[in-house]
Amino acid sequence: MAENVDPQATSGPSIDVAQFHSRASKLIAQIKKHQKEATDSFGEGEEWSVSMMKGSTDEGWLAALKDASVASVDVSKTVSLSMAVKEDSEYDILKKAAVLTNKIFKLSFIPKMEEIIDAGKSVSHEKISEEVNSAIEDPSKIKLKVPVDDVEACYFPIIQSGGDYSLKVSATSKPSKMKFDVIIASIGARYQSYCASMTRTYFVDPPKKVTGTYETLIDVQNACLDVMKPGNPLSGVRKAAVQHLKSAKREDLIPCLPKNLGFAMGLDYRDSDLILNDKNATLFRANMVFNLTVGFENVPLTDADKTELSSKAEVKNLDKFSCAIGDTYRVLAIDIESGGNNLPELYTKATKQGGDVVYTINEKGDDSDDDDSDESGDGDSDSDDSAAKAKGTMNVDGKRASSRLKTIKDSNVDAVESAIERAKIQADLLKKKNETRLREIARKNQKGGDADEEEEAQELKTYNKGEDMPSNVLPNQVKVDMATECVILPISGNPVPFHISTIKNVVMPEPDRATYLRINFHSAGVTLGKDVPANVVKLIEKHSPFATFIKELTFRSLDKNNLTSAYRQISELRKRVRQREQKEAEESNLVEQEKLVRMKEGKVPRLSDLTMRPALGKGRKTIGQLEAHENGLRFRSNKGDTLDIIYNNIKNCLFQPCEKELMVIVHFNLKNPIMIGSKKHENVQFYTEVVEASEQVDGNRRSMYDPDEMDQEQRERQLRKRLNEAFQGFCKKVELVSGKYGNKKEFDIPYRDLAFTGTPNKEMCTIQPTLNCLVNLTETPFFVVDLEKVDHVHFERITFSSKAFDVIIILKDFTKQPMRIDMIANADKDGLQSWLTDMEIPYTEAPMSLNWKQIMAEVVQDDRFYEDTEVDEVTPKPAGWSFLAEEDEGAGAGDEEEEDESEFSEEEGEESEEVSDASDSDGFDEEDSEESDFDGDEELEEEGMDWDEMEKEAAISDKKRARDQAEMERSERQGGGNKKKRR
C-alpha cells in the first residue's frame, strides 16, 4: 500500500474498489445499528460544513454514506466542551503563555508607546504592531530567554486610536498614524500552542467623561466575573453586564456594549461554540479557560465634555471614543468552605487601574503660559515652544523641568504608587492567609485528634534482680557492664547499678597520693542541655516534684588501675550510646522508599561525568552518571556506589544553566529526607564545572586580540552551549519518562533577572527565585525555600539610614526556626516585595530586629494565634502575623533617635547574638564590622578634604620627601663617609 501513495498527498493510497465497498458496508451496518442512540444523544444533525481535503478515499466514503441514507450529526459542540475543560498539565502552559503576554505588554508595547508619546513621533499603527509581533516571535529582543520554537502570536497585534475603533475579534491595525488620545491594544501570544490574550486601553489627556466611563467598565468586568462559576450559563455574563449598567444608572452605555464579551480558549484561540453572548445556554464548568473582554464602542463625546481640556490635547478632535479591557481567566471549582464566592483565577495580571493607564502631557494651564509668552513680544515663539516641549513639562514654579529631573520624578511617583498598591494587596493577602490557616488547622485537628500526644517517659532498667549482675563485681570497685549499658558503683559496700544515660559526664581530677574519679549525674533544678536524652528529660520532669536526685559521686583509690579503666570504659560507653541515639534521631522521620524499577524498553536517558553533592561515600568527590528509569533516578558512581531517587519523593526539580556561573546544575529538592552516608539530606545535586581539561596559568600578559586568547574564549562558549544543551535535553527526557509512567515531573529554571545578593549561610551569595522556590544552588550548604511551606515573610532593619536589610522567612511548621537572609541591599527591596506579592505571600516590615526564638516559642503555645480575639472572644487582638506590622507603626520616635547612631554598634551586635544562634551571629557581626568601617570612611571623607585636595597634598609631600633625600645624599658625598648625616 505504501508504494501507491500519491506524492501530492491528495488522493491517498490506492485501494481495491471491491475491498473498499466490503469494508464500508460493514462500517455502515454498525453505524445504523447505533444511529438511534447517537440521535437521542446529539439530536438530528445537518450537513457537514467543515472544510476538508478532498481525495478518492474521502469521496468514496461520503458517497457510501449518502447511498445508505445515514443521517449526519454535528458533534463539534460536544468536542468543544470536552476540550474546554483543561488538565493540570495544561494550566502551567497557559500560565506561561499569559506571563509571556504580560511581558510583551510591559517590555515591548508600553515602552514603545511611551517613547512615541514622549518624543511626539508620528508612527503608524501597523508599524507598532509589526514591532510588537517581532518581539513575540523572538522574545530575546526584549531579553526574555524563551525557546523561539515554543512561542508565536495568536493573532497580529491590534493597535487602534484616533476615533476609528472596532472591538470585534476580526479587527486589524490600520495604516494611519497613532494619535495621542485613546489607545486600545490587544495582544495575544501562544506558548507551546496554548493561547493567552489581553486587551488594555490607555488614555492621553482624557476628559472626566472618558475616565468615568473607564471606571464603569472596570466595575462591569467585576460584575461579569461574579457569574463565571460552574453551573451558571454562559449567557449570564452579558446579562450581568447589562444588569450592572442598569443598577449604576448608566443605561446610555448598554447600546455601546458588544454582543459578544469573550470566548473559551486553549489550543484554539477562539472556540466558536463557547461564546459569551446572550443566547449561549451552555453551562460553565470548572477548569475552563476564557478570554473575557468587556468594552464600550463608539461612546459619544460632545464639546461640553471637552471644555476642561488643553487646546493641545488630541482628544479634542474626537466626537466618539471606545475602551476595552480583556483578560484570560480560569474558572475555579466551587469551594464550599468559602461559601462559593471564589472568583475565576486571573492569568494576565498586567495593571489596568485608572492611575496606571492615564498619561497627562498637556495641562490646561499650558495654554495661558503660551499666550503670555506670545504677548511678551518675543518673535521666536515657535522656537521657544518647541524648545520648551523638548525640555519637559511646566512645574509649579513656572519653570520647565529637564527631562532627567522629570524621569527621576516619574520614577519616584511610580515607586510610591507601586508601594501603595502593594500595601493594599498585602492587607488582603494577610487577611486571606489567616482565614486559610484557620481552615487548615481545623481540618488537621479533625483528622489528627489526639494522635499528637507526647509519649510517656519510659523507666530505665538495668537488672531485674541482683543475681543478674556480673559475677566478677566486687563490693568496693567501679564496674562497667557494656552489655547492659550500665555502671555499677559501690555505695556503702553495696554494688548499685546506674544506667549510662543518667550520667552527665565523668572527670578524673589531678591525683595526689591517691586517684580520684568524679561522676556527675543529670538532676533536677539545673538547666538541661541539648545533649540530654529526651527520655531522661521526661523522667526528671516526672519525678522531680517528690524524688531526691544524686548530683555527683566521687571515688578515691590508692590503686589507680581500676578507676582509670572505669573512666576509659564509661567514656567509651557514653560515646557509643550517644552515637546510637543520634543515628536513631536522624532516621526517626525517614520514610521507606519504594524500590527502583529499571527501564527495560527503549534507550535509558543518561547524563555522564557528573559530580554529586553531598558526596556519596567517604571521598571528597563523587563522580558518576545519572540515569532516568520508570519510577525514579539512579546515580552510579565510578566506584560502584549507587543512590536511588524516587519520583514520588521529589518535591521540586531545578535546572540551572551555566549562564554567568561556573557550573551547570540539576538539583532535586525532596519531600522526605534520605540517608546519604551517615546523615539525612533533603537536597541532592548533580553538576558539571565549565572548565577546560588544561589551561595556561602562567603570568605572561596577552593582548586582547591574541588569537590564542580568542580561541580559548570561543572554546569556552562552545563548551557552555554544549553542556547546557546536554543537561536541558536530559531534563526533557526525564519529564517524558516520568510522565509516561504516571509520575510527571517538570524542571524549574531560576529567574536570573530577579536575582539578588544576600547572606543565608555566613557567605554572601546570589539568591534566585523560581516558580516554586527561592534558591541558591551554587554554594554549599544549599539554600532552598519551598514556597508552599512559607507562612509569612518579615523584613527587618528597614530604615532610611541603613544600606541593607534582613529577611526572615517564617515556615508553616512553627516548631522549626525561621530561615534568614541577611545583608540584602536596599535596592533589591522593591523587587523582592513585588515578587512576594505576585506569589501571594504576605509580608511585613519593621526597623528593629526581633528575638525569633522567643516569638516562635510563644506562637507554638498560642492556640488562637490566627484568631482576631482573645479567649473571651470579645477582646480584640492582632490576627496572625499582623502584630509585626503594628510594631512597625508603633516604633515612633525611637527610630529617629537610632538613625543618628551607628547602625552596627557594639550594643546591637550583642543584641543580635541573643536573637540568633552563634553561627548566624558570627557571620552577621563580620558583615557589620565591615560596613561600619565603610561608614566611618565616608564620614571622614565628608568632614575632611575631598579627593583633589588629598591628591594635591600627597604630591607636595612626595616632592618634599624627594628633595630631602637628594639633599642628604649630596651632603654625604661632600662630607665623606665618616661624617654623620644631617637631620
Image (cartoon, helix red, strand yellow):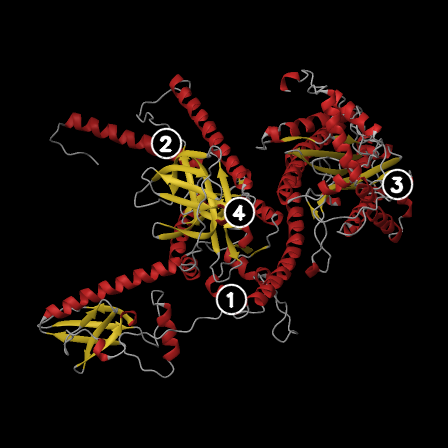
Q: Position of residue 487 (x, y in %)?
A: 22, 72
Distance from Cα at disc 1 to Cα at disc 2: 66 Å
Q: Earlier in the sequence, mark 4 or mark 1?
A: 4
Using the image as rendered, state which of residue 145 and residue 853 is in the foreground.
145
Write down the residue under mark 1: 860
Q: Earlier in the sequence, mark 1 or mark 3?
A: 3
Q: Position of residue 63 (x, y in %)?
A: 81, 25
Write down the residue under mark 2: 955
- How many other residues sit within 10 Å of disc 3, few (<14), some (14-19) or many (≥20)? some
Q: Amino acid at mark 4?
A: Cys
Distance from Cα at disc 3 to Cα at disc 4: 46 Å
- Please indicate, yes or no, whether residue 523 appears anywhere in the rendered image: yes
Disc 4, SS: strand
Residue at screen point 64% across, 31% down? 151
Q: Position of residue 753 (x, y in %)?
A: 55, 38
Q: Amino acid at mark 3?
A: Cys
Using the image as rendered, state which of residue 840 and residue 744 is in the foreground.
744
Q: Quadrant of the C terminus?
A: top left
**Apparent side of residue 396 relative to residue 929 in the rendered image (left or right):** right
Q: Amino acid at mark 2?
A: Ala
Disc 1, SS: helix
Q: Amino acid at mark 1?
A: Val
Write down the residue under mark 3: 256
